Image: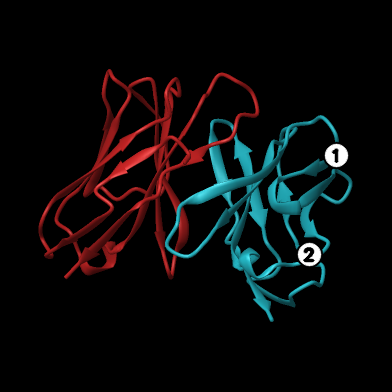
Amino acid sequence: DSGVTQTPKHLITATGQRVTLRCSPRSGDLSVYWYQQSLDQGLQFLIQYYNGEERAKGNILERFSAQQFPDLHSELNLSSLELGDSALYFCASSGLGQRNTEAFFGQGTRLTVV
Amino acid sequence: AQSVTQLDSHVSVSEGTPVLLRCNYSSSYSPSLFWYVQHPNKGLQLLLKYTSAATLVKGINGFEAEFKKSETSFHLTKPSAHMSDAAEYFCVVTHGQNFVFGPGTRLSVLP
């Protein structure tokens, strides 16, 4: 158990809909990362938050947004969903500020858009 | 900018034989390097990490990796493969405050 919790584990929704994925980082970790893993694109970095503020942005679509709350949990919002958004979405956390620290990954949320 | 190349998208070995998964990186800084493993329908688990201490790093499940700065490599090895090692393996380099993933190597272990 990595200590990172993601909910829900599975999500099936229709095109055009909006969903919210939730992530609780390991206790004490200030940094949260979101990744998308699909068969054709591999593991793609979406966005990083550190202590409530956006720190880095990757290949995140404008239809997607995220935030990190004061209790450090994070949510990834996906809107106007398309079939191509079907993927495994991972959250990871790390104790940024401690050099060379690794990232701990949750089990992922599998999103299926039909 | 940091980047990671995993030279083989798929490696197949027989059970009991050695495993070699190759990784090359580019980094403007003294890098931190990691290997993660992902079993089917599971999250990513840290195997080992290099943090500028010993160049030969030992990880879990008998895996180890050697950091070679002159070759910008961080290859993952295991002396004897087990069926349970079949999984996807990712080499990762830190880039500032982000983790840059390689494309992954799928390891198959044949009985």
Q: Position of residue B1 (x, y in %)?
A: 62, 42
Q: Does any portion of residue B1 appear in the rendered image?
A: no
Q: Residue at x 67, y 58 (%)?
A: B5
Disc assigned to residue B55: 1
Corner quadrant of residue B32: top right
Is B23 placed left or right of B3 in the picture? right
Does the CB distance between marks 2 and 1 fall below 8 Å?
no
Disc assigned to residue A89: none
Chain letter, red in picture: A
| Of the pair B45 and B53, the residue shown nearer to us | B45
Q: Residue furthest bottom?
A: B111
Say if labels 2 and 1 share a chain.
yes
Q: CA distance from mark 2 to mark 1?
A: 17 Å
Q: Which amino acid, mark 2? A: Leu
Q: Residue furthest right?
A: B70
Corner quadrant of residue B11: bottom right
Q: Under tag 1, what secondary structure? A: loop
Is B71 placed left or right of A62 in the picture? right
Chain letter for mark 1, please: B
Q: Residue at x 60, y 20 (%)?
A: A98
Chain letter, cyan in picture: B
Q: Does any portion of residue A45 appear in the rendered image?
A: yes
Q: Which amino acid, mark 1? A: Thr
| Of the pair B99 and B18, the residue shown nearer to us | B18
Q: Position of residue B89 (x, y in %)?
A: 61, 59
Image coloring type: by chain
Which residue is label 2 attached to? Answer: B20
Q: Under tag 2, what secondary structure? A: strand
Label 1 environment density (alpha carbons within 10 Å; few <14, some 14–19, many ≥20): some
